[in-house]
Every structure is written in structure tokens, then in C-alpha cells.
Image: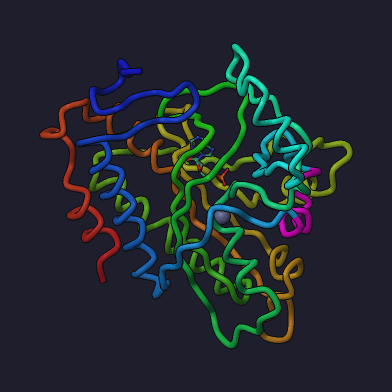
Amino acid sequence: MRSELHPDLRWRGNQAVLAGSLLSLYRRLDAAFARLGTAEQAPEVMYPTLLGAAQLAKLDYFRSFPHMATFACNLERDPDNLGTFARAAGVDAQGAVALTRLAPVTEVLTPAACYHIYVDLAGQVLPAFRTVTTRATCFRREDHYKPLERQWSFGMREVVGLGSSEDVKAFLERGRIRVDRFLEALGLAVAWTPATDPFFDASRNPKFLAQKLSPVKTEMVHQDRLAIGSINFHRNFFGETFGIEHAGEPAFSGCIAFGLERWIRAVLDVHGPDPAEWPDIAAAAQDAFGE
Ligand code: AMP
Ligand code: ZN
């Protein structure tokens, strides 16, 4: 379905189709954030779409965000089961598949780009501060969807740093200064806002209490309503969980995450739908992230 927002956007009810000028804007924004990675000597890695449920379970993801998970499932490979499925009508009026028995579900569709990085580095000793950048199509089930703002699947670019607490904090601080410069060059502004995860129940959940004492997530909030990115200090949570070591202790880590469709939304809000009016993303990235 065509969207009112822009002629190059089509809306599938929970996911966006990007074409023409919007696809080009998406790619230029992603290239700009990858450039922030380059400024931090971060090699780029492309991970698969599926992430092991066992890995996510180690993060307590299913306890914290059960409502968000999207599972990849297959039918049990037994001829009767497959036959029953094949003979059924397929989908009902709501578009729901009439599933028969499922094979064990062991994979989840990636909910955040950076999880793959910690899984990849599991069991390693990092001799020095390490950075990595990656882009992923991420999947989060939300209670409602809105084009470019709240989607079931969306693009996320992240730059991650791992090492000592001081190195990670300095990396995040440099990132914040560079993102501010980038925003300024684009004619955008955000309010940097400490965030607490609304899912955590203050009275019961120690993670929430810890977060209250020292905010770990700071969001880039556009027009007081839309978080277009976040800067996260994880302490040594991922280092401990995945056995990543630095200087004889679990590595500290932090990530800088950008929601690509939301950045498109911010550009459209501020500069309008005509690509001729949009700022030069590559030039802004050169100003902000160039050496
Ligand atoms: P988070 O890891 O929650 O900080 O997510 C990183 C960024 O992804 C957020 O700041 C948003 O810009 C973007 N994001 C998160 N959820 C969605 C969604 N459902 N649809 C579109 N973008 C999202
Ligand atoms: Zn992250």
C-alpha cells in the first residue's frame, strides 16, 4: 500500500518497503554510521539473520522481553505431519497459517544487531580495546506499528567497543560528540535522554534498580517523541555472560545504535519529502566522522 508519508514508501502493515530516493537515503545513512565505525578502527562484519535461542537465553532475553521475540520455526519433518500441513487450506481469513507439529525451535530472528558480536567473541581474551561495526535487519514484535517509526523489522547499524571500563566510556563519549556533530551538519537536533526499560518492574527486578543508580542507556530523542538511536554502557554484562576477557577480568562493553528508518523519518520531518531539499549525508559524515 502507498503511504501518505512519501511516494517511495510502501507500507505492509508492520514493515516498510523502501524504493528510489528513500532506499538511497537509507544506504547513505548506513554508510555514514559505518564511517563512525571506521573512525573507531572498527572492522565491519556481517552476521546471519538467525540467532541461537540458547544464546539469547543466556542474556535473560526471554525473561525480560518475551513479548518482543520473533521465532524462526519449521515443521516437524515427518511425512504424515508434512502431508497434513500440505493438505490444509494454508492460511485463514486473517492470513494465519494452519501449522501442524513444529520441529524444535532453536533460533530467533535477531532482535538487536550487537548481540551477534558478543556471541562471536565468546571465550576470547581481548589483548586491547576492540571495536566492531555491523548492520542487521532486526525483528521486534511491538503492540502497534507505524511506518518508519515502529516496525516489526527494521534496519539497525551499531558500533560496539569492548575493553576496560575507562576505554568503553571514552569510546561512548567520543561517539556522542561525533553524533552531535553529524546531527548539526544535517540540520537535525536530538534531546539526549536517559532511558529506563519500561518492561523492568522497579520493585522486583535488580536490573532496573541497577539502571536507576547509573543510567546505562541514553537515547537520541527526535522532536520529543522518537528515539532514533541510543548509546549503551553495558558494564561487564556481556563480557561475563559470554566469557570475553580483557586485562584478567570480564570485558566491559558499550554500543552506539542507530535505527535507520527512524533517521529517515527525522530527515523527512525536518527537510520535507523532496530529495533536492535533503542534506548531503556523505559530506556531513565526512565533517563529523572524518579524521
Ligand atoms: P535499542 O537497542 O532498543 O536502543 O534500539 C536501537 C534503535 O533501534 C532505537 O533507538 C530505534 O531507533 C530503533 N528501533 C527500536 N525498535 C524499533 C522498531 N520497532 N521499529 C523501528 N526502529 C526501532
Ligand atoms: Zn547494541
Does residue 116 lie above or below 26 as drawn?
A: below
Q: Position of residue 51 (x, y in %)?
A: 63, 55
In this rendering, position of residue 129 left or right of residue 235: left
Colour scheme of the rendered structure: rainbow
In this rendering, position of residue 134 left or right of residue 284: right
Does residue 120 lie above or below 147 as drawn?
A: below
Does residue 212 lie above or below 164 as drawn?
A: above
Quarter holding the C terminus is: bottom left
Q: Position of residue 12 (x, y in %)?
A: 43, 24
The span picked out in magenta is 54-63
| Numbered circles on residues, count | 0
**In this view, which residue lies farthest toward the top?**
93
Quadrant of the rendered image holding ligand 2 = bottom right
Residue sitting at x 39%, y 57%: 177
Residue sitting at x 66%, y 84%: 125
Q: Position of residue 267 (x, y in %)?
A: 28, 34
Q: Is residue 26 on the magenta stretch?
A: no
